[in-house]
Image (tube, rainbow, N blue to C red):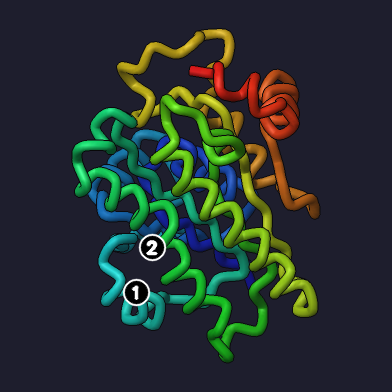
Amino acid sequence: MSKTVLVLGANSDVAKEAILLYLEKGYEVIAASRSTVEIAAFMETRNAPLNQLTICHFDATAFETHRSFYNGLPAKPHIVVYAAGFQVTNDEALVNWEGSYRMMQVHYAGAVSIINLIITDPDNNHLERIIGLSSLSGVRGRKSNFVYGSTKAAFTQYLAGLRQYLFARKVIVNVIVAGYIRSKMTAGLNLPESLLMEPAFIARKIVNAGNAFTIVPGIKWKLIHQVLKYMPEKMAARLP
């Protein structure tokens, strides 16, 4: 019997590429998103094996629907990927509570809500891996994006504790700490071309995740990750 992957936030550019890779490997994939029509259209253009794919509606911010969504899945997942994302600029977040709150809901509260349901399901005894797509923005607070970054930091810390909680059950938890990705969310932003990574590259890191908790795709971003973690506060304060 094929293993099942549940991808939450499946319409993100990275998630769609990851779905294709999982399908190539023979997994059954449940692609869950608010944008079901867009996912279906994308998969048709890429000639995905639709007999292995189920597309269903999922809204990370509609917490009251999460239990019925999970109970209605066609199969209990072996692997869960949480890739839902939403972003407004820091300037907007400071004056627009709705934008700030939505980032908190999508990146943290929604993730905790649905993942808690999955890990406490007594009927799913074959869960083996949970992967969360986070960001380097959550590694160190910076004045240019600390509202967005704080939501990613919270998600990363949740996953870190979840990894310990699930250790005895031998369920692996990974966090993908990604830098700049060429995607819908970054379109229009003035980002260095040399640091932009393609969604397919990040997707390969997701699908081939090993046992390490923190996975930082890209050599340049691995170096940046270390610098951000250990940079003295006086220097960090000068960052944009």
Q: Are marks 2 and 1 in contact (CB under 8 Å)?
A: yes
Residue 222 location, quadrant:
top right
Could you say which disc has been placed on residue 110 in the image?
A: 2
What residue appears at the point 65 percent right and 28 percent down from the top-left corner?
233
The mark found on residue 66 in the picture is 1
Specify the farthest residue to the front: 234
Q: How far apart are marks 2 and 1 (CA)?
A: 9 Å
Q: Is mark 1 on a helix, strand or loop?
A: helix
Residue 207 vs residue 118, the one in the foreground: 118
Q: Is residue 113 left or right of residue 202?
A: left
Check the image and name the residue furthest to the top.
193
Q: Position of residue 91 (x, y in %)?
A: 28, 28
Instruction: Give me the residue at 29% from left, 34% from top.
Output: 88
In the drawing, does residue 6 fall left or right of residue 96?
right
Mark 1 closeness class: few <14, some 14–19, many ≥20 residues within 10 Å: many
Q: Which residue lies furthest to the bottom in this view?
A: 122
Nearer-the-camera pick, 54 or 129: 129
Residue 40 drawn above or below residue 145:
below
Q: Position of residue 98 (x, y in %)?
A: 20, 48
Q: Indicate the amino acid at tag 2.
A: Gly
Tag 1: amino acid: His
For this rendering, which residue is in front, 52 or 170?
170
Res 55 → quadrant: bottom left
Question: In which quadrant is the N terminus drawn?
Answer: bottom right
At x 52%, y 54%, the residue is 154
